[in-house]
Image: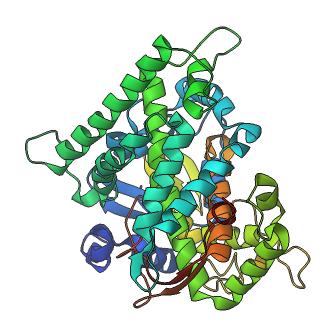
Amino acid sequence: MRGLPGPTPLGHLKYFKGLLGDPYDALLRLHQEYGPVCDFGFGSNHYVMMFGAEANKLLLDDSPKNPRFLSRDVLSLLIPVVGSCAMVVSDGTDHRRRRSLVQPAFAYRRLQRYVPIMVEEIHRMFAAWPPGQTVDAFTAIRSCIRRIAIRSLFGDRLQEHTDHIGRELETALKYINRSPFLRFDRDLPGTAYRRAVAARRRVDDLVRAEVEQRRAEPGERADVLDALLGSCTHAGDRLSDLEIRDQVISLIASGYDSSSAAAGWAVYALLSRPDVYARVRAEVAEVAGDEELTHAHLESMEYVGWTIQEILRLYTPGVLTGRTAVADFEFGGHVVRAGTKVLYSQYVTHRLPSLWDAPLAFDPLRWDKSAPGYREPEPYSWVPFGGGYRHCIGFTFAELELRALIAELARGTDLALSGPPIQPVGVATMWPKGGVPVEVRSIRPRRSALSE
């Protein structure tokens, strides 16, 4: 990769914080100093960084049958959580087969059934927030979204194991959210890697037992696990039990981690902008009033939808992700060689002045097509869920969760931020550092509870 711009070996010291797991300023500075493509890292953690919508299009707008880029080599860092057979770390025919078998579980009509579960769990969370005290909304939301994910995947039978699954996955998720320059992926006594793998194995034992029980006692439970167990191609091909377990755990983990990160940032963004929050409240009151929230209500909330798009732009859970090049390719006037690990950054793309007017401003109205001066986003300039044939399979579920949370937050709580502005932390997922502490001024009881 001779000729690629990038810092010298000594110049990497400028990015020391980024190497140690604080990548945000480092990523922006790399783009500012070297442009849309640069060489970064060393040894087994040597990468080519590519920034902007054109880079995203090149990497994401790929052919599923003849891909120019593969995922497993770079994303194998996730295996301690998701397992070796999860879709996210699969390539080629394995990926196409697994995606075709998992896709029916996320049919739009099926997902609508989960709105009552979302609403119930959100109100359960609010009920535990004592007025007059300060709570960490991020920690509470992580528990809430974990319960939603597990009930939607398994139904109510494994609900009693929710906290146990959360504790185990938290161990594994904290490990994979480290900087790759600080990881030691060796299964040796006392290592964080061994603790992460052991924690994930204990979750796998629970899922295995549930899969075995369902096979022994078939029945209609209408959840995602049922859909995975029943999924079948025209040729009679089905997911193996190992594949099912890995898909289930990866779905729990992504829902628990990415969705809760976005939801935590949503609380922070709304409480930071009273004007935006006031418009959200007004729309929720107009659309739903005091009625029990339904899927139809959520779909009708246009301004809430714009707000979510803006949250996912400025606070997208994904910081950067990548692929491995199958063959040489050219980008930005430079040749990148086959076998190179190539990373793209949602975080940087969503902050580029060339793509977004006032990119650091939180402005839901930038998504209003009827607004004067509306600017149509360029293709692949907004990529919170990736794109192309590897587009996140659970994106509709994640957006429904965010809509439900924001709507119920707006009409059911009176909160205020407590403490200084919140900074991001994490490499695989952007978490709010130190959580989202909020002062609970009041909680409005759920209307259905008042009528009982």
Q: Position of 171 compared to 76: left or right?
A: left
| Rendering coords of residue 220 (x, y %) | 63, 22
Number of numbered discs overlaid on the protein picture: 0
**Relative to 39, residue 352 above or below:** below
In the picture shown, does residue 411 fall above or below 378? below
Residue lying farthest top?
235
The foreground one among 45 and 156 is: 156
Residue at the image point whose x is 8% and y is 47% from the top: 190
The residue at 19%/45% (across/down) is: 195
Measuring from the top left, give residue 426's x and y in whole percent. 37, 66
Relative horizontal placement of residue 172, taking residue 341 as reference (left or right)? left
Compared with residue 379, is residue 374 higher up or lower down, i.e. above or below? below
Most extreme residue toward the left is 189
Residue depicted at x 46% and y 33%: 157
Residue 99 location (% of width, % of height) = 61, 31
Could one spot residue 342 in this view of the protein?
no
Q: Where on the picture, by quarter, is residue 363?
A: bottom right
Name the quadrant of the C terminus.
bottom right
Q: Is residue 312 above or below residue 352?
A: above
Extreme-front residue of the structure: 452
Residue 207 horizontal/vertical position (percent):
39, 30
Instruction: Name the residue at 43% across, 18% down.
Output: 213
Q: Quadrant of the N terminus?
A: bottom left
Tell me if I can see residue 214 in this picture.
yes
Q: 391 or 288: nearer the eye?
A: 288
Q: Nearer the viewer, residue 394 or 4?
A: 394
